[in-house]
Image (tube, rainbow, N blue to C red):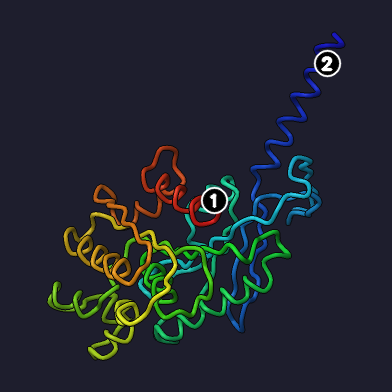
Amino acid sequence: MRAFGHFGASAFLLILFSFAAQAVELHEGITYRSGLKLDIHAPDTPGRTSQAGVVRMNLFSFGSPKVPVVIYAHGGGWVKGSRKKVYSLPEWLTQRGYMLVAIDYRKVPQTNIDGQVNDLSAAISWVRSNISRYGGDPSRIVLMGHSAGAHLVAMAAARNVAGDVRGVIPNDVQAYDMVAYAGMRGSLGYPYINAFGSDPNDWVRWSPVTYARRGSGFPPHLFLHSGSNGERRRALTNGYANLLKARGARAAVFDGGRYTHGSIARKLGASGDPATVTIERFLAQVTR
């Protein structure tokens, strides 16, 4: 009986510590600039108090080093969306030892794409200055976004307003070269016309290729594209990736032809999901 009791106590503690290690610690609604907020989803750490007021203990992570940070820009066609649209990213990334920072940014027509890139840049600066207080490593930041957010993180890297980041993960957007996009499609259509307008000069101004063609020193990129819009989406993604390679950057493309525009974001974190595995490998490489 004594041996059984000892085993039971040990098993209970192991389960308790394992649960604590996998819990997500949420720091919600932090203002990073006037009117704009971000949420920090962190791997649970010892001695912190959750929103429910419960102190979690995790003896195995005591004194652990700062963790890499993924800054996430949501989708929504530049005109809508929220930092809350993160699918299963918090659970997935924190279980893998990363911190997720999900940001809001102003929408068109309140601002334009220049303003949105500026908001993203401000969020990156805030993270770099403050994230160590939450257990994040400011020297290991990766940018990630879906749809319009993918365009914004690509723009921030191309225009060199992101500072020194370890990597960029644009997930499924066609806006790398808006002149080429308009030529392939025949027109912009919603939501592109709302965000980019009808002036071709703005299409050039807000296309990452414009800056990549004359820049260098870009961080590693992992592009993902779905099968939505078929060959056009594939061509625009590969075209930009090849341009970055020509400029000396590391760039890889995940061909997600079996995904839709929504499912390539929604399925991230699922066991055995190919896009998930590809991103995990990229993160491990660039943050080690």
Q: Quadrant of the N terminus?
A: top right
Q: Nearer the viewer, residue 151 or 83?
A: 151
**Lower sequence index among marks 2 and 1:** 2
**Outermost residue, right side:** 2
Q: Amino acid at mark 2?
A: Gly
Residue with the mark numbered 2 = 5
Q: Secondary structure at mark 1?
A: helix
Decide if residue 79 is in sight here.
no
Report helix, strand or loop for mark 2.
Answer: helix
3 on left or right of 37: right
The residue located at (32%, 69%) in the rendering is 244
Label 1 neighbour load within 10 Å: few <14, some 14-19, many 20+ = many
- Residue 52 is situated, as x and y percent measured from the top left of the image, at 75, 53
Residue type (three-letter) at the residue carrying disc 1 = Leu
Residue 172: percent from the left, percent from the top? 32, 61
Res. 252 in view: yes
Q: Report the front residue among 147 and 255.
A: 255
Assess whether mark 1 and mark 2 are in contact (beta carbons under 8 angstroms): no
Q: From the top left corner, tell me how far across and down residue 24 is, in percent.
A: 64, 50
Count of residue discs:
2
Which label number is shown at residue 18?
A: none
